[in-house]
Image (cartoon, rainbow, N blue to C red):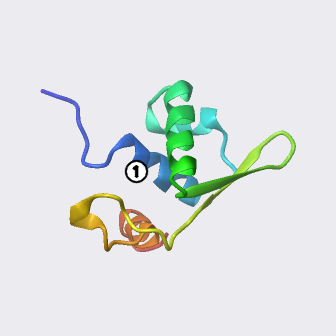
Amino acid sequence: MKNWTFITNHGLVLLYISKNPQCTMRDMANALGITERSILRILGDLEEDGYISRQNTGKANVYRMKPKLKLKHELTKNVLIGDLMKLLSGGSG
């Protein structure tokens, strides 16, 4: 049986930081079951495309999701990131 999920690692990282804005890459990697190297690449992608911003607060980063941005795919281009995160959080995001 193949191991796959409906939500990509990019989506899972975004969901995780929407709930845990002061998390570390290690926290994310442990919670999501992917490597810290993958987390670093995904954070870079999300930041480069404007979906998150990162503020260094000394020893840690604080991540901020940009909830008013829309998804990238043609089929979902009218869906706001914040609305997707609320849906994935069970409406409590």
Q: Estimate the x, y position of residue 27 in percent, counting from the top left.
A: 60, 38
Q: Estimate the x, y position of residue 76 in percent, counting from the top left.
A: 27, 66
Q: Name the residue located 66 percent from the left edge and 46 percent from the top edge.
A: 23
Can you tell which quarter of the image residue 9 is in?
top left
Can you tell which quarter of the image residue 77 is in?
bottom left
Within 10 Å of the Cα at label 1, are there few (<14), some (14-19), or many (20+) other Cα atoms?
Answer: some
Q: Name the residue located 49 percent from the left edge and 69 percent from the top edge.
A: 93
Nearer-the-camera pick, 74 or 61: 74
Give above or below for 67 relative to 45: below
Give above or below for 51 relative to 7: below
Disc 1 marks a residue whose amino acid type is Gly
Nearer-the-camera pick, 5 or 8: 8
Q: Name the residue located 74 percent from the left edge and 46 percent from the top edge.
A: 61
- Left or right position of 42 against 27: left
Residue denoted by label 1: 11
Q: Estimate the x, y position of residue 37 in percent, counting from the top left.
A: 54, 25
Nearer-the-camera pick, 61 or 92: 61
The total number of labels drawn is: 1
- Left or right position of 20 against 1: right
Quadrant location, the N terminus: top left
- Left or right position of 61 against 28: right
Q: Name the residue located 83 percent from the left edge and 49 percent from the top edge.
A: 57
Nearer-the-camera pick, 90 or 48: 48
Farthest right residue? 58
Farthest left residue? 1
Name the element at disc 1: helix
Give above or below for 15 relative to 85: above
- Left or right position of 30 against 84: right
